[in-house]
């Protein structure tokens, strides 16, 4: 089996937690599966047996790649308290980035227009790169005692609402509201981040007005 890139493993994760579209699942297995006879059988079309076998095979592939199958899982626990203020701020953004990645992966099957799918994929890639850079900065500090950059925190690109579907737009707003309320709870007990706290309050207020 050839090396599986992280984005394809994330696809497998999304597929396993979705309606499990047979065609896209088969394309994934044809690329990474090792049983040629099974590939031929699955290519004959969707049956109850074929769907069951495809599910079992993709589960096995995902299980064999746990380090990239579950986005956001860290190999070692990082003690936030030992990080400088700038890196603590970046560390606090990791959960939001992970949720952004998972949320937009779950949207891919719902989007019909190619332009919207492209924008959704671009948001995923952007969040993945930001998450990777945060970990690079933290690893550099743990190894060398200094930050890769100074006074230049990683900026999370706001999730753009691009779909014309009003129902999907409301779902997106509600998802953002959940993330922002979680941030509000964390920031409420951090007096030194009062500016960030007030900014989150303003964003919550704007979204609630749009939903009402």
Image (tube, rainbow, N blue to C red):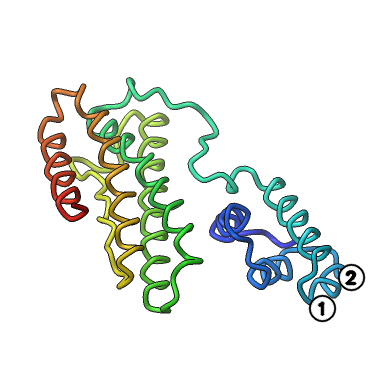
The residue sitting at the front extreme is 212
Q: Residue at x 28, y 64 (%)?
A: 161
Q: Residue at x 33, y 21 (%)?
A: 82
- Could you tell whether 70 is left or right of 22 in the image? left
**In the rendered image of this protein, does residue 90 appear above or below residue 116?**
above
First in sequence: mark 1 or mark 2? 2
- Which residue is under mark 1? 44
Residue 43 is situated, as x and y percent measured from the top left of the image, at: 79, 76
Label 1's element?
loop
Q: Give the number of the mark in front: 1 or 2.
A: 1
Label 2's element?
helix
Q: Residue at x 21, y 40 (%)?
A: 150
Q: CA distance from mark 1 to mark 2?
A: 11 Å
- Which residue is under mark 2? 37
Q: Residue 41 falls in which quadrant of the image?
A: bottom right
Residue 154 is situated, as x and y percent measured from the top left of the image, at: 26, 47
- Could you tell whether 170 is left or right of 110 in the image? left
Q: Nearer the viewer, residue 143 or 83?
A: 83
Q: Residue at x 36, y 63 (%)?
A: 168
Local crowd at mark 2 within 10 Å, few (<14), some, or many (≥20)?
Answer: few
């Amino acid at each position: 089996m050839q090396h599986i890139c992280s984005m394809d493993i994330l696809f497998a994760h999304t597929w396993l937690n979705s309606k499990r579209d047979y065609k896209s699942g088969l394309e994934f297995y044809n690329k990474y599966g090792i049983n040629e006879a099974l590939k031929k059988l699955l290519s004959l079309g969707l049956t109850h047996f074929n769907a069951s076998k495809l599910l079992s095979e993709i589960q096995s592939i995902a299980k064999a790649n746990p380090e990239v199958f579950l986005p956001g899982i860290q190999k070692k626990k990082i003690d936030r308290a030992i990080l400088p203020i700038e890196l603590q701020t970046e560390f606090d953004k990791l959960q939001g980035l992970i949720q952004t990645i998972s949320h937009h992966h779950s949207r891919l099957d719902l989007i019909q227009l190619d332009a919207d799918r492209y924008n959704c994929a671009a948001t995923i890639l952007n969040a993945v790169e930001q998450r990777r850079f945060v970990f690079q900065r933290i690893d550099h500090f743990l190894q060398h005692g200094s930050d890769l950059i100074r006074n230049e925190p990683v900026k999370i690109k706001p999730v753009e609402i691009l779909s014309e579907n009003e129902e999907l737009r409301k779902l997106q707003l509600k998802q953002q509201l959940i993330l922002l309320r979680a941030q509000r709870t964390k920031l409420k007990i951090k007096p030194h981040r009062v500016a960030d706290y007030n900014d989150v309050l303003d964003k919550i207020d704007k979204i609630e007005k749009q939903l009402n």
